[in-house]
Image (tube, rainbow, N blue to C red):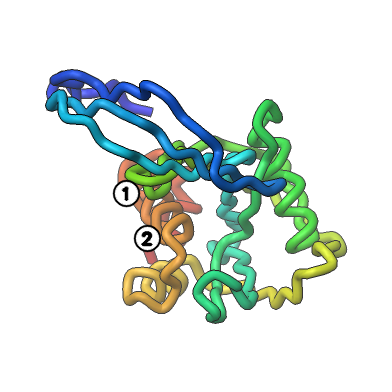
Amino acid sequence: MSQKPSWLRAHGKPWVSNSEKVVYENPWLAVREHDATSPTGRSARYGVVGFKNVATAVVPLHDDGTITLVGQNRFAHRDYSWELPEGGAPLGEDPMVGAKRELREETGLVAKDWTLILNTQLSNSVTDEVAFGYLATGLSAGKPSPDETEDLAIARVPFREALNAAVAGHMPDMLTLAMLLRVHHMASQGELPHGLARLVLG
């Protein structure tokens, strides 16, 4: 990734947590309430959702310029979501190991080549969740093995068609949108092999 510009430097004082308590916890997350001091010196009560996994997402990019997407019903928004293969890796595990596992379980695909292309924070005003996104190429097919609660559909679509759908709001999952835009940017900047870039750019 490119060098950070000088204007991205931090300024001011950081938040300070004077004390904290866990108000809710389950195997995936914990909600902590902090007695905090803000950067302006004012006292504040701050709730943070802490995750016990990092999020992972994969762009499975085939040699013909198509990608594999996964469709499933999502509980939180009570809607149906088409998105990239996504999941989580426990804290302390290499996120790429988790990403490989999720790709194989959700789609059956195994990739020869893996590249970290995105490291981002999700909803950073109220959660500490981070995400790692990978470009997976050199794909070979296998049999999916989803979790017992997952009823998944799989679609293989042209990259540009998926990007257009995401930008139009038909695939509102933020990791999916960010990852597709990142791959498109890579193609436009010469960061992908020429033939593959041409297919991505349409």
Q: Alpha-carbon neighbours of circle 2 within 10 Å: few (<14), some, or many (≥20)?
A: some
Q: Is residue 98 left or right of residue 82?
A: right
Residue 197 versus residue 10: which sits nearer the camera? 10
Answer with the quarter of the image where residue 169 lies. Answer: bottom left
Q: Confirm whether residue 135 shows in the render.
A: no
Q: Which mark is residue 199?
A: none
> Pointer 2: what residue?
201
Q: Amino acid at mark 2?
A: Leu
Answer with the quarter of the image where residue 163 lies. Answer: bottom left
User: Where is residue 132 drawn, in percent x and y?
Assistant: 53, 40
In the rendered structure, which disc, 1 or 2, sits on the residue that comes first in sequence? Answer: 1
Q: Secondary structure at mark 2?
A: helix
Q: Is residue 10 left or right of residue 127?
A: left
Q: Name the residue rendered at 31%, 29% in the picture.
A: 36
Label 1 to label 2: alpha-carbon separation: 7 Å
Q: Name the residue rendered at 12%, 27% in the picture.
A: 40
In the displayed structure, 107 sits above or below 18; it is below
User: Where is residue 116 drawn, in percent x and y?
Assistant: 53, 36
In the displayed structure, 74 sits above or below 52; it is below
Q: Alpha-carbon neighbours of circle 1 within 10 Å: few (<14), some, or many (≥20)?
A: some
> Pointer 1: what residue?
188
